[in-house]
Each structure stands twice: as C-alpha cells, then as structure tokens.
Image (cartoon, rainbow, N blue to C red):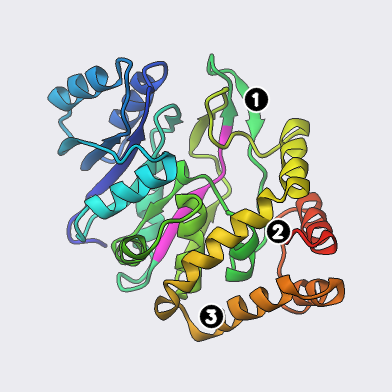
Amino acid sequence: MYNNEKITILLATYNGESFLEEQLKSLNNQTFNKIDILVSDDGSTDKTLKILDEWSRRWNKGSFTVVFGPRKGFSENFRFLINSLDAQDSLVAFSDQDDIWHADKLGNAFKQLSAVDLKARAMYCSRSRLIDVQGRALGYSPLFRRKPSFGNALVQSLAGGNTIVLNSAAFKLLRESAKRTCFFSHDWWCYQIIMGAGGHVIYDSVPQIDYRQHGNNVFGRNKGVQAMWHRIVALFSGDFSEWIDVNLHALEKCQDLLLMNNVDLINKFKVARKGNIVKRLLFLFKNDIKRQTYIPNIGLYVSALMGKL
C-alpha cells in the first residue's frame, strides 16, 4: 500500500470544448477520492481555458493546476506534462480531453498496482469501450491475450494512454527518460521503457473507459475495416517503419536504463532491419517478436517481407 494514497492525472488539452466538460465530470465521479489534476493546454482558442478555470475553482479532490504547453503537438504536450511533475509518491494517470472514465477506473488501477512491490516499476492499462460523438456504443478495442513483453513493445503499443496509470517507481523512470528524449507517442513509450527496464505491465481485459471516436482523434479506433485500412496504408507508405525509427532512436538515448538483454535485442533489431528478407524474418521468428492479434501479426511479417519494418 502507498503511504500517500493519491493519484495525479496528467491531462492534455487543445480546443476541447466539445467534450471536456463530460470528461472532467467523469474524473470528478471517480470512487477514488484523492486526485490532483495537472493540465497542459497547448494553445486552445475556444472555451477550453474557461471550462478549466471553472473546474479548478470547484475541484475538491485535491489540487487542480493549469499550465501552458509547448504547442508542438500532442506527444510533446504529454512529454511536457511528464517533465512538469516533480518526482513524488503519487501514482500518475494520463487523460485525454474527450473520453468518459468509468467510476471505478482509478480505484481498480490503484488496487492492482498496490499488489505490486513498491520498488518495482509497474504500469496498469486496460481495454476500452468505443463510443461515437453522441456517446453511443460502437464496440470494444481488441482484446489482447498475449503476455506483455519487450519484444511486443518494439512493434506495438499495448493500450491507449487514456487507460494508463503508473506507480511512482515507473513514473520516475518515465520522467528520467522524458528528460533525455522525445518519443512517437506517450502510451507506446510507457510500454517500451517500462518493459525494457524489467518492469511489470498489468493489462486489464475489462474496459475502464469510454473512448470517444471522432474526426479530431489523433489515433482513433484500432478495430474494424476502417482501422484495418489505416494500418495497411501506414504499412505501405512507410509510416510504420518511421515510427519504429523514432522509438529506436529514443531507446538509444536510454540504454543505461534498460536491462542488458533488452539492449542486445534492440541491437539485433537494428541489424535485422538493414538485412535481407531472410534476416528480417528470422529475427522476428527466433526472438518471438509478435503483435497481439492474428491479422496485425501477419501485417508485421508482411512489413518484414517488404523491407518496411
């Protein structure tokens, strides 16, 4: 159990007036009571700041602080938040501006993280229920059954950042890495750096949030025909390979934070990516590098065949 039973939510906003009120209501309705909120607004020109100001005045679960972000996109905004929060005993959660959290989300995360040794780095994340702009159910994010691993983290993010909660040891690791490097997305990076350092990742198969799907999502639903098409486009356009480039460059800057066997795996991955078809495929097979579900895993091998890994 944690001495200071508190969770700090890092909330990134940008022109979020359409759904922010509902998001903040769901944070306020959490059964977990001690919650600090740190918001980084990335230059909103709508009513976002007014909404935040109103909520900061009536928030009674802890502190509610609004700072101004770097205006360099969502990933850098979250990195700015990570670096803005002093190392502490608090658990840390990430929040988008347009979802709806189930009332027990933080309570469930706290319970599961409390079962892990305090000195161990641990990350909680979950499946999501998908909703449309009006809040109508669209289905669920894919159910992942494979055990989290660093090999999986090299080629796939496990869960949305809006589901992630870190214990204090994991956040301190994340913050140290964020001082050194930028990253493609904070959710994928959390999975990579924590697994790479030998930490624990808890994947909750029970959805804990309603993840809103709309035209302004940076990354929307990862299930269905449209999502499949976006993945195919990313594969053929080389976007997937570029994402891997960014991640590997970031991991290079944090090698001393990682287990040596994972550093070795990274180096083998770099060599294999530059090798011929046989070397690329053998690397995936020999090191059991897989994505979580069947069709995306086929896509991974196709990317290796095409030299787009």
Of 194 and 15, nearer the camera is: 15
Position of 286 relative to 186 (above/below):
below
| Dots 1, 2 in contact, CB < 8 A | no
Q: Nearer the viewer, residue 294 or 47?
A: 47
The residue identified by callout 1 is: 138
Q: Is residue 51 left or right of residue 280?
A: left
Q: Position of residue 120 (x, y in %)?
A: 36, 72
Q: Position of residue 202 (x, y in %)?
A: 50, 59
Residue at 54% x, 59% y is 246
Residue drawn at x 51%, y 66% is 249
Query: Given the image, on which type of amino acid does mark 1 rest?
Result: Leu
Q: Which residue is mark 3?
A: 263
Mark 1 vs 2, N-terminal side:
1
Q: Amino acid at mark 3?
A: Val
Amino acid at circle 2: Arg
- Specify the principal SS of the magenta part: strand
| Badge 1 element | strand
Image: magenta residue range = 122-129
**In which quadrant of the rendered image does the C terminus lie?**
bottom right
Element type where label 2 sits in the image: loop
- Indicate whether 89 appears above or below 42: below
Determine whether 230 is above or below 76 in the image: above
